[in-house]
Amino acid sequence: MDKTIPMTPVASSNIAAVGYQNGTLAVQFTNGRLYHYSDVPPEVYAEMLAASSVGKYFASNVRGKYPAEQQGRQQ
């Protein structure tokens, strides 16, 4: 199964880009690590994109709340 999710760059000191597809939220950190979070409702992705601080939204609403799987490093 192809796990490639289109990514949108974001303005954040910790997060480089985010993407969403079929309940999976993809988060690429500025250190190059890419994680997929499963069972994420679409409104969480929309709220994350609209947040004044993407990093703070992620820390409060995603990290530790959804199953995560590291996908590796992106260049």
Image: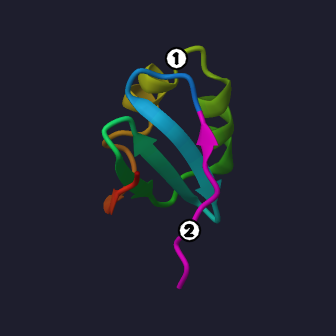
Badge 1: few (under 14), some or many (20 or more) residues near its Cα, within 10 Å? Answer: some
Q: Is residue 28 above or below residue 57?
A: below
Residue 4's label in the rendered image is: 2
Locate residue 25, reporting x and y percent: 53, 52
Locate residue 59, reporting x and y percent: 37, 29
Q: Secondary structure at mark 1?
A: loop
Badge 2: few (under 14), some or many (20 or more) residues near its Cα, within 10 Å? Answer: few
- Asked whether, in this view, residue 1 is left or right of residue 55, the answer is right
4 inside magenta stretch: yes
Mark 1 and mark 2: span between their CA atoms? 25 Å
Q: Quadrant of residue 74?
A: bottom left
Say if mark 1 contacts mark 2, CB within 8 Å: no
Q: Amino acid at mark 2?
A: Thr
Of callouts 1 and 2, which one flags the residue occurring earlier in the amino acid sequence? 2
Q: Quadrant of residue 8?
A: top right
- Tag nearer the camera, 1 or 2: 2
Residue furthest to the bottom in view is 1
Q: How is the image coloured?
A: rainbow
Q: What range of the chain is rendered magenta?
A: 1-9
Residue 34's label in the rendered image is: none
Q: Secondary structure at mark 2?
A: loop
Query: Residue at position x 35%, y 45% from top?
Result: 32
Magenta-drawn stretch, dominant element (helix, strand or loop): loop
Q: Is residue 63 above or below residue 7?
A: above
- Asked whether, in this view, residue 68 is left or right of residue 18, the answer is left
Query: Residue at position x 61%, y 21% from top?
Result: 51
The residue tagged 1 is 53
Locate residue 22, reporting x and y percent: 64, 65
